[in-house]
């Protein structure tokens, strides 16, 4: 991206931002991407690992907007954020080049917007079963599918782990990229022979705790 284009696109970006500030919630974060890189970024209170000039990641809201030219909204996982956030992307043009404007809403707004699930409906064998949320011991992402477990039975749901993380009650804790656990079903926590943290559930199941999520567990259980 040449310097002349970058300078002009930055000026246009500022015009979009001045309009946005009139209607988006305070502490929102804003990013504008043109082609394959970000040309503007303003951070709200979130800890976001994003910089001007950074490449647009495949599967991100910005990438989807630029590719489809459609408004896109999604719950973002913690690859760019410390905790999940709700983002909305809009197709725009910068000097006739397809671009994406992405607004990331603050967590307080998201928590008010999304009510916690009271139950999940999952498929077991050839039946769909609604299950009260407090009966679920843990939830797993495996082979691009989401499974939850009740009394040793496995149920499949179409809801992703990152979406569930935004809608589960506070007694569910994300402990790994592939696991969310109900703290009421935890029997004990300890380190294994390689010093990795392991959770043992009351039914004997063992779940790994990744280093990036260990603080979530420590803060929730105060140990």
Image (spheres, grey):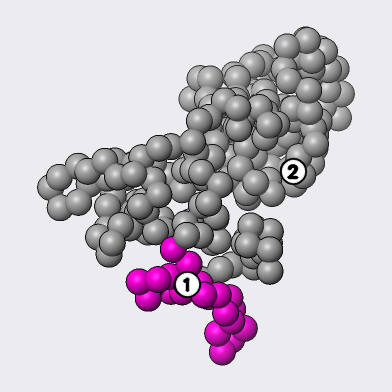
Q: Which residue is the site of mark 2?
A: 48
Which residues, given as a range, are shown in magenta?
A: 185-206
Q: Say whether residue 107 is visible.
A: yes
Please tell me which residue is depicted at 73% across the width and 34% down the height of the picture: 38
Q: Residue furthest bottom?
A: 193
Percent position (x, y) of residue 144?
A: 38, 52
Q: Horizontally, is 210 left or right of 54 in the view?
A: left
Please tell me which residue is depicted at 36% across the width and 40% down the height of the picture: 119
* Mark 2 vs mark 1: in front: 1
Q: Is residue 146 above or below residue 2?
A: below
Q: State which tag comes first along the sequence, 2 or 1.
A: 2
**Quadrant the C terminus occupies:** bottom right
Q: Which residue is the site of mark 1?
A: 187
> Which of 2 and 36 lies nearest the eye of the viewer?
36
Q: Horizontally, is 120 left or right of 191 in the view?
A: left
Q: Is residue 149 magenta?
A: no
Q: Horizontally, is 70 left or right of 62 in the view?
A: left
Q: Quadrant of residue 7?
A: top right
> Which of 210 and 34 lies nearest the eye of the viewer?
210
């Amino acid at each position: 991206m040449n310097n002349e284009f970058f300078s002009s696109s930055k000026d246009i970006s500022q015009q979009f931002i001045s309009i946005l500030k009139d209607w988006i919630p305070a502490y929102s974060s804003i990013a504008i991407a043109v082609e394959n890189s970000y040309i503007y970024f303003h951070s709200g209170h979130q800890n976001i690992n994003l910089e001007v000039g950074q490449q647009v990641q495949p599967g991100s809201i910005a990438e989807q907007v630029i590719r489809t030219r459609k408004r896109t909204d999604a719950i973002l996982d913690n690859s760019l954020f410390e905790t999940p956030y709700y983002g909305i992307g809009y197709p725009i043009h910068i000097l006739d080049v397809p671009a994406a404007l992405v607004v990331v809403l603050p967590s307080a707004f998201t928590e008010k917007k999304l009510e916690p699930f009271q139950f999940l409906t999952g498929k077991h064998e050839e039946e769909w079963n609604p299950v009260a949320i407090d009966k679920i011991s843990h939830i797993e992402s495996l082979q691009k599918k989401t499974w939850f477990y009740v009394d040793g039975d496995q149920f499949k749901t179409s809801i992703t782990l990152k979406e569930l993380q935004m809608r589960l009650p506070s007694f569910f804790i994300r402990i790994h990229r592939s696991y969310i656990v109900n703290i009421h079903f935890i029997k004990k926590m300890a380190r294994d022979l390689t010093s990795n943290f392991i959770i043992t559930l009351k039914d004997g199941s063992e779940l790994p705790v990744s280093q990036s999520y260990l603080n979530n567990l420590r803060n929730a259980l105060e140990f």
